[in-house]
Amino acid sequence: MIMDRISLILVIIGALNWGGIGIFGFDTVAYLFGGQNSTVSRVIYTLVGLAGVWCVSLLFREREHADEM
């Protein structure tokens, strides 16, 4: 469950970053961490990519109905 939330947060960050690139031509991650080829930026891009792969599994999981009352 915690891995799902972390992955979703990272995917949202990635989506906002790509939205900024598409709309404004501005890469926030690269700006904050020293360019697209800096080590920190590459680690963040990699984590966001792995989170996206993890979130694919959410599509194929059976839903739990914990909120039924």
Image: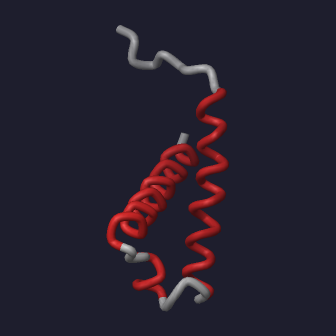
- Residue 65: x %, y % from top left: 48, 16
Name the residue nearer the viewer: 22 or 50: 22
Instruction: Farthest residue to the top: give it.
Output: 69
Quarter of the rendering occupied by the C terminus: top left
Residue 48, position as x, y percentages in the image: 57, 61
Vertical arrangement, residue 18 with respect to residue 25, above or below: above
Residue 15 vertical position relative to residue 55 in the rendered view, above or below: below
Q: In which quarter of the image is the N terminus?
A: top right
Quadrant in the picture for residue 46: bottom right
Q: Residue 40: name its quadrant.
A: bottom right
Q: Residue at x 59, y 89 (%)?
A: 38
Residue drawn at (47%, 86%) of the image: 33
**Residue visible at 55% across and 80% down?**
41
Q: Where is residue 17 in the image (x, y as percent from the top left)?
A: 42, 66
In the image, residue 8 lies at what x, y percent?
49, 48
- Give the left or right position of residue 59, taking residue 28 as reference: right
